[in-house]
Amino acid sequence: MSLTRREFTGSSALTGAGLLLTGSVGALATAPGALAADDAPEVASGPAPEPGYGPLVADPRGVLALPAGFTYRILTHSGVTRLESGEFTPSNHDGTASFEGPRGVTLLVNNHELEGPRADWEHPVPLTEGLVYDPAAAGGCTVVETRADGRTAEWVGIAGTSTNCAGGRTPWGTWLTCEENTDRAGENGMTKDHGYVFEVDPYDRRANRDPRPVKALGRYDHEAVVIDPRTGYAYLTEDASGPNGLLYRWVPPHGFRHGHGRLARLADDAGALQAARCFDVRGAFVDDLSRATRIGTVYGVDWVDVPERDARSVDVRKQFGEGDVTRGRKLEGMWWGDGGAYLVSSYARAESPGTPHDGQVWFYHPRRRTLTLKVLLGVNPDPTKDGAFDGPDNITVSPYGGLVIAEDGAGLQHLFGATEGGRTYPIARNDLNDSEFTGVVFSPDGRTLFANIQEPGIMVAVTGPWRRTPRR
């Protein structure tokens, strides 16, 4: 059922839900700790307290700067640590999810964003027997087991996939890994088509044998995916340009029930793959998410069927004409929380028709069928200086309130938090190199924050005096 403009623009559609229609802030910001040029509003109880944990302290080891009282340890390091099978940990860590194991064990499924032929990479994902999709491809996932006593083990979850960027954790306890690459068989040395989603089970190695793509979710430059635990709908982002990528929804076929391995057994055309088409409070079509310039902006969302989801002759995002769908530049990480999907647009410049920015975080509310701008980063005037943030990418919902975001911008790279009111604060800084942070996720008990430095490929576990984040 689509959300009609009459429903959206009617006074009862949103006002009663307590959502903002026109936004609460007037301009973009470049200052740290605030996502708009206006200062945080004062209320009767006084100004909002400063969020976060204080300034970052440079790391004597030259890896990770953290606030006072926080510590880290390295779990995996490409070219240094080894898998159970003896090969080195693969490189280029990316999207990650955590799972609760027995007796205090945490399991982490870790993507490796390796594009193209295996010969191009010193440490590709090893071709473990039975776990290979395309023996020519370098990417895949590893599973990392970390114990309370500090012991760590790692093994292959899937191999022979390409450019495994983000993905998403399922409600039934598996990981959906997404290929951000659409090489066909015969292109770039590949022997099979790419651009798909695959399921990886962190608990049962046998379940990962003979990997099959979930073709029902489409073939395009996948970034991330989340599953609505109530309806079973999947929401997916696409990181692409020329034209900009799309936000997708997959509606399961009637009677389908999710569960371990069931997605891969679906018919290639099962269910409906759709792309988002947004309109503002006046009912006007919104061509690109860069049009939004105020935190609190709300768009209504309709969904348009994808004509040909396997993109045999035309890329999926190019199958729509002008005015058909709403686009966004670098639609990246997603995370399910608060009854909906948080999703990131990393930046907008000349390739986007709206206002330049250095990052947006949106929240899609599936019941209201609305997309609300929660975080907005102004163009960072000097990314080489500590303070402001730019280029959000992977994202997670914090058990302490708000969001934790991995930075993939220019210059210095951070993990940073965002309060429910849209204020930002630093959590960590990459003191090793200028590589992006990826794979940010909390342990199931909320005590440890895991994250990756993508290159060369380092997974860290951060602990410290976590506390509830102020709402404002």
Image: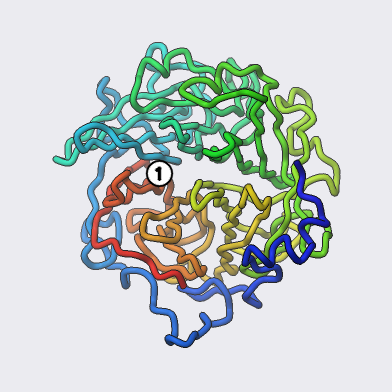
Color style of the picture: rainbow
Q: Nearer the viewer, residue 17 or 118?
A: 17
Q: Quadrant of residue 223?
A: top right
Q: Nearer the viewer, residue 400 or 388?
A: 400
At 85% from the left and 47% from the top, the residue drawn is 322
Name the spot of residue 232 as percent of width and height, x first.
57, 34
Quadrant for the N terminus, please: top right
At 56% from the left and 16% from the top, the residue drawn is 265
Q: Quadrant of residue 81?
A: top left
Q: Dot 1: what SS? A: loop
The answer to whether 6 appears left or right of 218 in the picture is right
Name the spot of residue 121 as percent of width and height, x first.
44, 30
Amino acid of disc 1: Glu
* Vertical side of 360 occupied by 47: above or below: below
Q: Quadrant of residue 290?
A: bottom right
Residue bearing the label numbered 1? 455
